[in-house]
Amino acid sequence: MRKVTLSATQAGRHHIPEKFNCLSDNFEPNPTAIINEHIIPTIEHYINLLCKYTPAPDKDTGHVLALTGEGACGLSLFSIAEKSLYDELIALSAQVTEERISKMAKEKGMYVAVCYYKRIDGNNYNVTSIFAPDGQIKGEYRKTHLPPEEMWVCTDGDDLNIIELDFGKVGVLTCYDLYFPEAASVLALKGAEILLHPTNGDFGEFTRRARANDNCAYLLTALKHVPGTTGSSSVIDRYGNVLVQTDAVRDSVCYYTVDLDERKVNPEWFYPAQLTGIADVWERKLQERNPSAYSILTQPAKRLLPADAEGREVLRDKMRKGECRW
C-alpha cells in the first residue's frame, strides 16, 4: 500500500494597490516595495491556507503532497511591465518563495509543490519545484507551453521530466500545458502516477477528467479563485472521476487520500481482459499502442513568436482602455 494525501489550494487573488498596477499612470516600479507589500503577503497567504487546512502526515494520510496554484509569488500581474523590472522581481521573489516554502515543508513534514517564476542561466522560467519533508528541492519542472503574454518575459522549458518521490513518480502540467494532450501522454509513458496541474485558468472539468482517464493517472489541480469564472481545485482519479473539489469557494483547500497501488483495472469478465490476461488498463494500453502511426506528432511545428516592443505597447494601451483583458 502506497498511501498519499493529495492537497490543493484555491486561493483568491489579493487586491493589488494602484501604485503596483503597471498599467496605471501612478505605477511605482519599486522592486523592494513590490516584494515586501505584495509578493511576500501573497506567498504567506498560500502557506497559511496549506497549514490551516491540509492534514499532517500520519498512518491514515500516508505521505502528504500539497500543491499551490500557478504563480504563487504573485508575479503574473507584472508580466506586462518592462522586462528589466520583471527580471529583477523574479530574482528577488524566487529567493523569498523558496526560503518560505522550504521552511514550511520541513516544519510540516510534507511534500509541497509550488509554482513560481525563477531565473536560471540568464533566462526566466515558470517553474514548479517540489520541496521534500527535509526542506530540500527534490525536483523541478519548467513549463513547456507558454501562452503569448508569458512569451514576453519567459523562456519555455524543453523537457517533460519526471520527479521521483519516496512514494512514486510525479509529472507536472503547468496551466496551458494541460491544453496539449501529448504532454500528459509523455509524462504517463515515462511512468507518472500523479499529474500536478497548478493553474491560473480553467480548461474545463471535462479536459481534466479526460487527461486523468486517458493516462490512468491521478490529476491534482490547484486553481486560483476568480469571481465570476468557472472551475475549481480538485483531485481526479485514474478513471476520470472527481474525488473531491473545492467548488466556487474562495481561499479553500481540498484533499483526498489515495493508494497508488490501486491500479485502474477492468473486471475479470471484460472481453479484452479475458483475451489478453491483462486486467490492468495501463499495462494493456502500453502493449496496444501503435507509435509508428504517430510520426506527425514529432514533426517540427511553426512556433508562435511573441510581440515586439511596439506590439507590446499597443497591447498595453488597449488594456488601459479596456479593449483587451485577461
Image: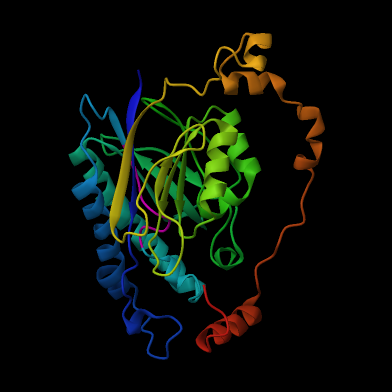
Q: 37 and 108: which one is in front?
A: 108
At 34% from the left and 51% from the top, the residue drawn is: 246
Left or right: 250 as drawn, with respect to 91: left
- In the picture shown, does residue 318 fall above or below 235? below
At 29% from the left and 72% from the top, the residue drawn is: 32
Q: Position of residue 46 (x, y in %)?
A: 28, 55
Query: For residue 260, which quarter of the picture?
Result: top left
Q: Position of residue 89 (x, y in %)?
A: 39, 67
Q: Position of residue 319 (x, y in %)?
A: 53, 83
Left or right: 117 as drawn, with respect to 13: right
At 61% from the left and 16% from the top, the residue drawn is: 270
Quarter of the picture containing the N terminus is top left
Whether residue 315 appears in this view of the structure is: yes
Was residue 244 drawn as part of the magenta stretch in this picture?
A: no
- In the picture shown, does residue 206 fall above or below 31? above
Q: 226 and 314: which one is in front?
A: 226
Chief SS of the magenta region: loop
- In the picture shown, does residue 178 fall above or below 79? above
- In the picture shown, does residue 131 fall above or below 306? above
Q: 294 and 282: which one is in front?
A: 282
State which region is magenta: 65-73
Q: Count the marks: how many?
A: 0
At 26% from the left and 34% from the top, the residue drawn is: 133
Q: Position of residue 94 (x, y in %)?
A: 36, 56
